[in-house]
Image (cartoon, helix red, strand yellow):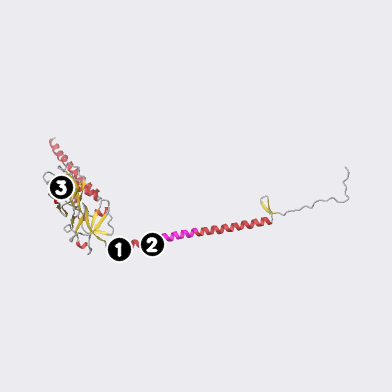
Amino acid sequence: MCSLFSLILPLILLLPLVSFALTIKGEAQEIKSARLLDLVIRDYTFHSYNKKNSRTGTSRPVHLPANLSGIEVHTARFRCGSLRRYGAKLKEFHLGNGVIVHPCVERVVVITQNLGSNWSSIYYENYELSGYRLVSPVLGLLAYNGGDDVNSSNPFEVGILAGRNPITVDFGSAGIVNNAMGGLIPLCARFEHDGKITLGNQVSANYVCGAKGNGHFGLVVESPLVPERKKVISRWKLAMGSSIGAALGAFLLSLLLIALLAKVKKKARMEEMERRAYEEEALQVTMVGHVRAPTATGSRTVPAIEHGYRPSPS
């Protein structure tokens, strides 16, 4: 009995780990949107906090599971007042003094993301990037409320607004593939929550962009295939427009011909009816059974009494 229990006990202890591993695998398969990826990273970040590594103002990496390999995440907790007075430098992001965290009661948990080359492609599925292509990994700066006990708090996203100086995003050390730019000067792209993209110029050399608040950012260049694609689309539209115009013209022409034929036929019918009416008026026609036969107006001779004729007496 004891040996059986000793065999079952490790299996019982391993069940939560197996369940957690299956949950992680299922989450990785279901992550198809950038917003869901943010929530998954947020949950792993908050679960990684404990009393030993919850020191305020200290940046530390967040270890993600193997199914999220390729993503680099760092986090730090700040007091809202201290962050506003002194700012902070967290990986590729520099928050100058004067930044405003809204809403924030006491502390804020700041998370930076470097999605790498693989996970950055998720933004092709959620944003309209036609005409442009990414030449850098997508970098994210997100913030959540953080109380005294991070694990017991209910994390919700808060906003970080720049002060007099913009928040800078340094792509110089973020794994940019320079030969992928094709000699073009990249533009700074901000991926908004509503699925739109805001483009802007770099604020300084070495691929440094400026931002007015937290969010996701990347460098893009105009795709060289855009003119050819536009030309193909224009030819296709021209061919479709010509076909539709020709079909519509043929349809209208057929309607005109039908109307003309109907008018000619109606005119011929009216002329035939007038001719028959004239003939029937000149030569009266009567029905003899089921046959139409012409008739003439007859005149009878009025009888006259002969002279000298006297009727015999009855």
Viewer-closest of 170 and 174? 170
Q: Residue 160: percent from the left, percent from the top?
A: 20, 50
- Asked which secondary structure carries label 1, the reply is helix
Disc 2 vs disc 3: Cβ atoms closer than 8 Å? no
Tell me which residue sits at (64%, 55%) in the image. Answer: 277
Of the numbered discs 2 and 3, the one sitting upstream in the chain is 3
C-alpha separation, residue under disc 1 versus residue under disc 2: 18 Å
Q: Amino acid at mark 2?
A: Ala
**Label 2: which residue?**
239
Q: Which is in the foreground here, disc 2 or disc 3?
A: 3
**Label 3: which residue?**
81
- In the image, residue 17 sits, relative to residue 253, either above or below, namely above
Q: Amino acid at mark 1?
A: Pro
- Which image quadrant: the N terminus? top left
Tell me which residue sits at (20%, 56%) in the image. Answer: 210
Visible residue check, residue 75: no
Q: Amino acid at mark 3?
A: Gly
> Residue 247 colored magenta?
yes
Disc 1 vs disc 2: Cβ atoms closer than 8 Å? no
Residue bounds of the magenta highlight? 243-255
Of the numbered discs 3 and 1, the one sitting upstream in the chain is 3
Left or right: where 43 falls relative to 308: left
Quick one: label 3, few (<14), some, or many (20+) residues within 10 Å? some
Viewer-closest of 290 and 148? 148
Left or right: where 122 falls relative to 257: left
- Asked which secondary structure carries label 2, the reply is helix
**Label 1: which residue?**
227
Viewer-closest of 109 and 176? 109
